[in-house]
Amino acid sequence: MDFEAYREPELRSARLVLEPLTAWHGESLFGLLKDPMLYTYIAKEPPLAASHLSRRFEALEQRRSADGEELWLNWAVRIAAGGYAGLVEATVRGDATALVAWWTFLPFQRRGYGREAAAAVLDHLRSIGVREAAAFIDTRNTASIRLAEALGFVRAGTHAMREKVRGRWIDDHEYRKVL
């Protein structure tokens, strides 16, 4: 894959516009991303201020790891007729594989936005030559597990004590999908 030539596009689906994430989104997304309930199953902490979130997003604007071996693709998911519903992330590696993750903000869960946004990103990854996507999901996160399975991901294994979340070791399911 030619990481140098890649430019992250805006993506569209039936109801959504996926905007490449920029520092500008920090102010718009802060109110939704500061909810502690979003962090039940992940090791990240809620942002303390919109300015902190903007700085975090600004660092991601380079779209590449420091060694140039990975593409860091991040989209803010906007409902075409309204506000922001979530985020989708993809880390693309030189071997044509990607690690994907999705967040649907609490007020927008259970409306199909997460599935629609993740499907748009998976379609885009396929179009740029990614052959396989993987997702690691906390074994307790049944909503995300159902979403992965609805997208055609298959459980490839379970990893005990993969990471620490709020001082407690958690187990993750590894899901894979051939694109």
Image (cartoon, grey):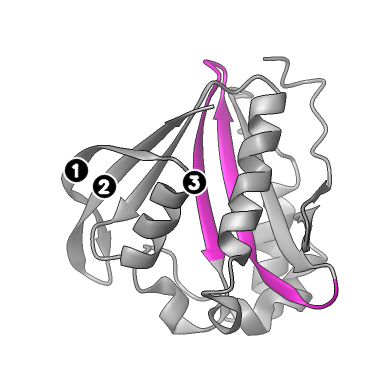
**Numbered mark located on residue 50 in the image:** none
User: In the figure, 40 relative to 8: above or below?
Assistant: below
- Screen quadrant of the N terminus: top right
Q: Quadrant of residue 91?
A: top right
Q: Give the quadrant of residue 140.
A: bottom left
- The residue under the point 38% across, 34% down is 176
Query: Taking 176 as reference, is 142 above or below it?
Result: below
Disc 3 marks a residue whose amino acid type is Leu
Instruction: Assign the C terminus to one quadrant of the image.
Output: top right
* Nearer to me, 146 or 52: 146
The residue at which mark 3 appears reads as 151
Q: Is residue 147 left or right of residue 106?
A: left
User: Which label sits on residue 173?
Assistant: 2
Under tag 3, what secondary structure? loop
Q: Is residue 64 visible?
A: no
Q: Earlier in the sequence, mark 3 or mark 1?
A: 3
